[in-house]
Amino acid sequence: MADTGDTAWVLASSALVLMMTLPGLALFYGGLVRSKNILSVLMQCFVSAGLIGVLWVVLGYSLAFGSGNAFIGDASQFFLRGMTVESLVANFATPPRQIPEYVYVMFQGMFAIITPALILGAIADRMRFSVWVAFIGLWFLIVYCPMAHMVWATNGWIFKSGAIDFAGGFVVHMTSG
């Protein structure tokens, strides 16, 4: 049985992270660039959120939380295969309580979405839009997903080493530079 309080908290947290990205970071970075590039930065932020959101559901969640090995997951949950409305995941509360897995997918997806938006601040005004889209797609699959698996998956290398990263310091901030 899913814990309703934990589920509500994770849903609220997911909404807050999404608000931080869109419009938060989009407007913040828009204010840092020349006026002729504001729409470009806003579009890069919104399109990267959409692209990473789709990639997360298609393959990212499976690479980050699939059984795989200590460094990367597998494609066992490709397109969220095997997940049902009744699927639950345990959280790290004491005693452990559970939340719906779809809620967990969304929560972790928000971290996946905000990370390339943080990278956008470093390259604003410096990269063509098409190159940005190709870069974040490849970066997400090559850098973010393996790091998320190593840190957050129970069979991940860094997780097994005893590191606990609830706020995304390892995954989000280290991979976004």
Image (tube, helix red, strand yellow):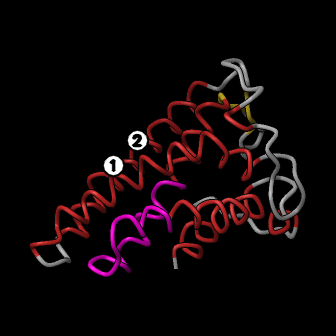
Residue at point 52% right, 73% down? 176
Q: Residues within 10 Å of mark 1 (few under 14, many from 20)?
A: some
Vertical order, 104 against 139 (above or below): above
Vertical order, 83 against 25 (above or below): above
In-front residue for pair 95/9: 9
Residue at point 36% right, 52% down? 47
In-front residue for pair 132/3: 132
Q: Are marks 1 and 2 in contact (CB under 8 Å)?
A: yes
Q: Residues within 10 Å of mark 2 (few under 14, many from 20)?
A: some
Report the disc number at residue 54.
none
Disc 1 marks which residue? 19
The kind of residue on which mark 2 rests is Ala
How far apart in space, not on screen, are marks 1 and 2 (Cα)?
Answer: 6 Å
Specify start and end residues of the magenta stretch as a single range: 112-135
The kind of residue on which mark 1 rests is Met
On the picture, is 112 further left or further right than 36?
A: right
In-front residue for pair 42/93: 42
Could you say whether the residue bearing mark 2 is in a helix, strand or loop? helix
Residue at point 67% right, 34% down? 79
Main secondary structure of the magenta stretch: helix
Question: x and y percent of residue 58 in the render?
Answer: 63, 40
Q: Quadrant of residue 70?
A: bottom right
Quadrant the N terminus occupies: top right
Question: x and y percent of residue 101 in the render?
Answer: 67, 32
Report the disc number at residue 15.
2
Could you say whether the residue bearing mark 1 is in a helix, strand or loop? helix
On the picture, is 44 further left or further right than 139?
A: left
